[in-house]
Image: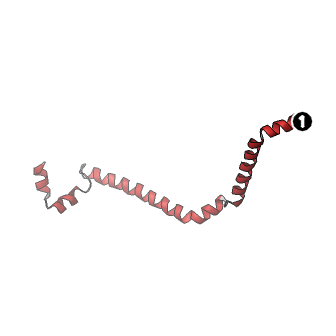
Amino acid sequence: MDIQQQLIQYRYHLAIAISVSVAISLVLYAAPRLTTIVAYFWPLFASTTLFVVAIIAFTGVSQLAVEAQGGEKSGEDIVDYVAGHSHVDHESVE
């Protein structure tokens, strides 16, 4: 009798534990496998990887170009051209 009274005392805890374990089991059963997800999205993963590698490569090349120019700011010549200032005017303004 003592065991039945303790089971009745903890009936909500047991019901919640059983419900959670059944829900987790159903989700694991119904969810697709990891290999299926990777097989579906591999072109996206591959293109994103190539894009990130290209950005890293071009950033490194751009830093080398800036250092080769003597430390001028990137795009400063284009801004001067659009603003209508020549390179000589820009140096005299500073």
Q: In this rendered view, identify the residue nearer to me: 17 or 90.
A: 17
Q: Residue 21: horizontal and vertical position, in percent? A: 73, 49
Q: Residue 44: horizontal and vertical position, in percent? A: 52, 63
Q: Quadrant of the N terminus?
A: top right
Q: Residue 77: horizontal and vertical position, in percent? A: 21, 58
For label 1, the SS is loop
* Amino acid type shown at disc 1: Met
Residue 78 as seen in the image, left or right of residue 47 = left
In the rendered view, would you say 94 is above or below 86? above
In the rendered view, would you say 39 is above or below 16? below
Q: Residue 70: horizontal and vertical position, in percent? A: 24, 49
Q: Quadrant of residue 81?
A: bottom left
Q: Say few, some or many: other residues with alpha carbon within 10 Å of mark 1 (under 14 / 14 to 19 / 20 or more).
A: few
Residue bearing the label numbered 1: 1
Q: In this rendered view, identify the residue nearer to me: 40 or 19.
A: 19
Residue 4 as seen in the image, left or right of residue 39 = right
Q: Quadrant of residue 6?
A: top right
In the rendered view, would you say 59 is above or below 14? below
